[in-house]
Amino acid sequence: MTKKITLFVVLLLPFFSMAQITINGYVTDSISGEKLIGATIYDIDNKEGTVTNNFGFFTLTMKSTSANLVISYVGYKSINEKISGIGVHSINVGLPSSRLLKTVSINANRNQIQQQTQMSTVSIPIEQIKKVPALFGETDILKVIQLLPGISKGNEGSSGIYVRGGSPDQNLILLDGVPVYNVNHLFGFFSVFNGDAINNVQLVKGGFPARYGGRLSSVIDINMKEGNKNKIHGEGGIGIIASRLTLEGPIKNKNTTFIISGRRTYVDLLTRPISYLASQGKASVGYYFYDFNAKINHKFSDKDRLFFSSYLGKDVFSANSTDEYLNNKSELKFYLKWGNITSALRWNHLISPKMFVNTTATYSRYKFLIGATEKSTQSGITTSSFGYDYLSGINDIGLKSDFDYSPNSKHQIKFGANWVYHTFTPGINAFKAADTGFNLDTTFGGSKKYTHEAYTYIEDDYTINDKIKINGGLHLSGFLVQQKTYQSLQPRISGRYLINRNSSLKLSYCEMTQYIHLLSNAGIGLPTDLWLPVTKNVKPQNSQQAAIGYAKTVKEDYEVSIEAYYKSMKNLIEYKNGANFFTNAIDWESQVTTGKGTSYGSEFLIQKKYGKLTGWIGYTLSWSWRTFANKNNGEKYPYKYDRRHDVGIVASYQISKKIDVSATWVLATGNALSLPNQRYADLISLYPNASNFSSIQKSSILNSIESFDKLNNYRMPVYHRMDAGINFHKQKKWGELVYNISVYNLYNRLNAFFIYQQTNYQTNTVELKKLVLFPIIPSFTINFKF
């Protein structure tokens, strides 16, 4: 009998040695049911764990017969789940929110920065973003991102993002997985993202995982909320220049939820009557923008979910004037419009306990239109008319599938494929004119370009042992244009080595290829940028970036990271000297020149996400260069947004449940710009007797010639500014009121928007002048929740 038992145990040993437990499910907000992206699931017995993906889903497989899980997320109380028994266990965990989070159980088990494989990545809780003081009280996600190390902003008030020496077109900005091509309102002073509709924001500026592609410098991955599944909930605000409202909740039952969010400015309603009265009814000027987000999702079963989300935003500027004399009337109208539409239809499916797939159909459109019309009438009868339109833009339709596969706790494998059909409208000019005996209706300019872009990828987040973890992958992409196919195989690798429990050393290397260009005209302050594809003559942009870093968690509260990087870029394009967006009508390829760029530097960030005091301190030391054969005599010159030093400090402090305060302070080296070191008038050909002119006459002649010794040879003054805000919370029976008072540019620093030269005719000298855009600006906003 004993021999039989012994034999039985021996036969079962392989089974027990391979005994596994698989746990999967979703982590959500316990009140709203909103999915929590990047929540940590950690088994304190087996010392293994994972995080939720972009859809709040996780799967964890271990060689064990039980698990003691701690599930945690920033701003929420942790929950402990004990599970026993081999096989598959599906759980859905709802975490309760906590404004003040300070417990050992959470701090000890969250996904700390030194444990993460990926480097050059920053996640900012949306509630922290909404506390940062903002211009006119309008919460702006991109403005907050500009405060992080490695990010340079454009001019004063601009939403431009310049990451590690890159340009705005090199940022892949995703809203629910769909690219957004223009992210600016009010000529760049605000971004298009309404914070009330956003669930999660993540910035990746290096060490890119293989799943991302198509841009060189950064990925800003933004996910919309899915809608409260338990009750109707609303929030919004009434500010100085804009108001917003968000509604979300279930439809009939908890299996279907929705969210709709809208925002609109009313600057036009305020300025149009003033301009109308000032001109005695002969002229009016108006401007407004709006954003509209909507999302609906339905849960068919624990394995299948369907989502549809959409964004629509637009800016409209108009100026009208009327001139009347006797029976004659002349009407002139000028208009400027630009905006985005994005849509995504996605299906989540659980193929097996270890594999999850998300399939998405996408649509994205950006359109820019500038135009003018003039009409003359006599006794009510049209005698002549004229109209001009300039249109540019880009349309995308696409389809992609992304798979998450976790065979065991040591491997987190992602793979998938994507296809996009692009339609580029690089610039179409349309003229219409009618007069007595004459009619004109013609269109000319850059013809539409139709292209295909596709990629496939695979990556693995592989835990080698307790100290070493690597994320390695390949990204293979292709682009078909003008019967020519470009291909690119891009290796990606990141790794971390745990020095001890609280610190690690990180390394990364990645190659990126970009098949579209943004042709910008630096001298025009309008959104006249043109999205253009690569062609037979204009090659894809390419970059290589390497980085090394050190990450540490101090006292379980502070995350510290130090990184150094080097990035090289080639096949960058710019307008040739003297060319601009109007000259592209004939052949834009002949108007551009190709060059390369390099950037390198180091970044420091200390961030605190927990407790009464939250925020971060960031510092960047960097260099960014450009080299074009047809510019600056072929020598390298500093990029416009090359900034040697950049500092950003953000702090929020909750005094009590009723009052919290926040402040930001920024300091940056001034932008580089080109100023002539010599100017002289070309008098000989036009004025034979020029030698008899006085010095004042010579300097006043307009056809002067300017000479530059080098490009970007001058620095604007150092930029610095402080913003501050305070929130007063007041509980009501129906919800909560929050009174926000904020001050932009608290100590009234007169930062230059741009620098220009002006001749002083009394002294016959040229003087530098600066235009200041924003002095100290107080604002008041009433926010509400119900």
Image (cartoon, helix red, strand yellow):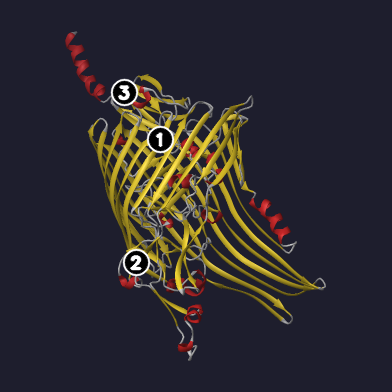
Marks 2/3: CA–CA distance? 53 Å
Viewer-side residue, 766 vs 561: 766
In this picture, is 532 found above or below 292?
Answer: below
Image coordinates for residue 186, horizontal then vertical, percent: 56, 54
Sequence-wise first label, 1 or 3: 1
Between 522 and 232, the residue placed more toward the observer is 522
Q: Is residue 583 above or below residue 644?
A: below
For disc 2, the marked residue is 595
- Between 214 and 329, the one nearer to me in the picture: 329
Residue 485, label in figure:
none
Q: Nearer the viewer, mark 2 or mark 3?
A: 2
CA separation, marks 2 and 1?
Answer: 39 Å
Q: Amino acid at mark 3?
A: Ile
Q: Which mark is residue 44?
A: 3
* SS at circle 1: loop
> x and y percent of residue 382 in the render?
77, 73
Q: How far is the residue under mark 1 from the one under mark 3?
A: 18 Å
Check disc 1: other Cα within 10 Å, few if <14, some if 14-19, many if 20+. Answer: many
Q: Which mark is first along the chain, 1 or 2?
A: 1
Specify the amino acid type for callout 1.
Gly
Give the labeled residue for mark 1: 38
